[in-house]
Image: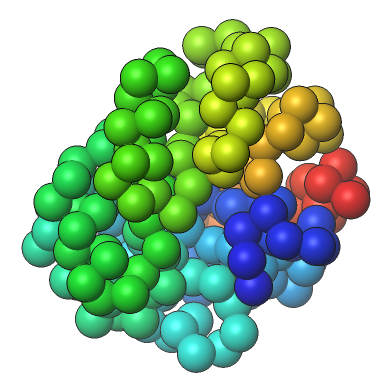
């Protein structure tokens, strides 16, 4: 699979970040069952390593988020991740990801930061935080002169905004809290509702 590829599942990265890890496997299975393929489990989610390891090699594109040090890249690789995501652009993280053959999605905000991340070898640049910065309008303007750099707006993205970001040229979007709801903060999350939100996100990316 390639980010920004042909199908809607190539255009949505589900971000799993939560305070509770006991339902992590069930949440991952629910998202995959709904048709999502890109799952990012953040390093500040309890149980992330085991969840990534379980999914590695199943055909899911499983990655690790909030990877801020080369040591965390090593851990992600040990778990079997295929990509790492970060809130910012750390050249050491990018270099380690390249050494280990992992895709790297660093966070960047301004045109200068986006160019810098691309020059360091980003697979795609996560434009973060996308929503509070100006949403799809900001993405359209920043992309006009940078249209050779794949951009993945992330941060506060709502399901009903997915189509708008893709329409102005995002190759994919990162969807965290708006997709996950209470899935990783409640002991008894509504997995049916989670599946419906995942299906809505895929429909919006079609
Ligand atoms: O930490 C990382 O590397 C990430 O990619 C996670 C994202 O920064 C946010 O967690 C976005 O999530 P929402 O704002 O909830 O949609």
Quadrant location of residue 88?
top left
1 vs 22, left or right, is right
Quadrant location of residue 86?
top left
85 vs 24, left or right, is left
Q: How many marks?
A: 0
Colour mode of the rendering: rainbow
Q: Position of residue 154 (x, y in %)?
A: 53, 34
- At x 26% / y 64%, what residue is drawn? 97
- At x 50% / y 90%, what residue is drawn? 57
- At x 21% / y 72%, what residue is drawn? 99
* Residue at the bottom extreme, as displayed: 57
The residue lying toward the viewer, choosing from 96 and 12, is: 96
The residue lying toward the viewer, choosing from 34 and 129, is: 129
- At x 68% / y 54%, what residue is drawn? 4
The residue lying toward the viewer, choosing from 197 and 36, is: 36
Q: Quick check: 53 above or below 111?
A: below
Q: Position of residue 123 (x, y in %)?
A: 45, 54
Q: Quick check: 114 above or below 194?
A: above
Q: Position of residue 66 (x, y in %)?
A: 30, 47
Quadrant location of residue 153?
top right
Can residue 123 be seen from the camera position used here? yes
Can residue 194 be seen from the camera position used here? no
Dividing the image into 4 quarters, which one contains the N terminus? bottom right
């Amino acid at each position: 699979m390639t980010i920004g590829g042909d199908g809607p599942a190539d255009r949505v990265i589900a971000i799993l970040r939560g305070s509770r890890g006991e339902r992590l496997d069930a949440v991952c299975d629910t998202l995959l069952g709904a048709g999502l393929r890109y799952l990012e489990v953040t390093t500040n989610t309890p149980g992330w390593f085991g969840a990534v390891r379980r999914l590695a090699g199943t055909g899911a594109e499983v990655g690790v988020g909030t990877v801020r040090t080369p040591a965390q890249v090593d851990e992600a690789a040990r778990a079997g991740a295929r990509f790492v995501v970060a809130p910012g652009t750390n050249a050491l993280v990018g270099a380690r990801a390249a050494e280990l053959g992992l895709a790297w999605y660093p966070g960047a905000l301004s045109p200068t930061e986006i160019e810098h991340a691309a020059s360091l070898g980003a697979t795609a640049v996560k434009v973060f935080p996308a929503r509070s910065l100006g949403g799809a309008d900001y993405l359209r303007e920043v992309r006009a002169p940078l249209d050779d750099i794949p951009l993945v707006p992330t941060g506060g993205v709502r399901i009903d905004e997915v189509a708008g970001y893709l329409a102005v040229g995002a190759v994919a979007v990162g969807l965290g809290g708006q997709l996950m709801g209470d899935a990783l903060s409640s002991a008894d999350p509504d997995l049916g509702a989670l599946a419906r939100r995942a299906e809505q996100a895929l429909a919006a990316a079609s």
